[in-house]
Amino acid sequence: MSHQTGINSSEELRTFLGKCKDGRIRVFKVGIEEEQMTLQGFKEPRGSWEEDYESFVCQFIEEKQPCYLFYRLDSQSDTGCDWVLISWSPDNSP
């Protein structure tokens, strides 16, 4: 059995997700504010996923703030671009 948390996504985030299908976004950050998932930033690719990874991911990580990062690889499958989900939840976060 599964239960929903009651946390929904913002309209801005839902609209943004629809734009991520074309491969123009390399990484985006999602956080939770006031019981809602919100878009907290994004970056377009500069180079290959390997070249962009360290600088882009480190830029979005905050020491005590949990978040989700969605990072697009350069590969594709039958359903579109391949993405990696990074869940950041430090022990000392609020």
Image (spheres, rainbow, N blue to C red):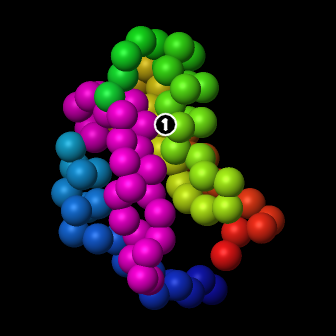
Question: Which residue is depicted at the point 28% across and 51% down?
Answer: 17
Q: Is residue 82 left or right of residue 25?
A: right
Question: Which residue is depicted at the point 43% across and 75% down?
Answer: 33
Q: Quadrant of the N terminus?
A: bottom right
The residue that label 1 is drawn on is 71
- Can residue 23 be found in the magenta stretch? yes
The image position of residue 52, as x and y in percent, is: 50, 21
- Secondary structure beneath disc 1? strand
Q: Vertical placement of 39 versus 52: above or below?
A: below
Q: Is residue 90 left or right of residue 67?
A: right
The image position of residue 47, as x and y in percent, is: 41, 12
Q: Vertical placement of 92 versus 80: above or below?
A: below
User: Which SS does the magenta portion mostly show?
Assistant: strand
**Magenta-colored span:** 20-43
- Can residue 22 be found in the magenta stretch? yes
The quarter of the displayed image where residue 27 is located: top left
Q: Is residue 22 left or right of residue 31?
A: left
The quarter of the displayed image where residue 58 is located: top right
The image position of residue 46, as x and y in percent, is: 37, 16
Amino acid carrying label 1: it is Tyr
Can residue 20 be seen here?
A: yes
Q: Vertical placement of 13 versus 72: above or below?
A: below
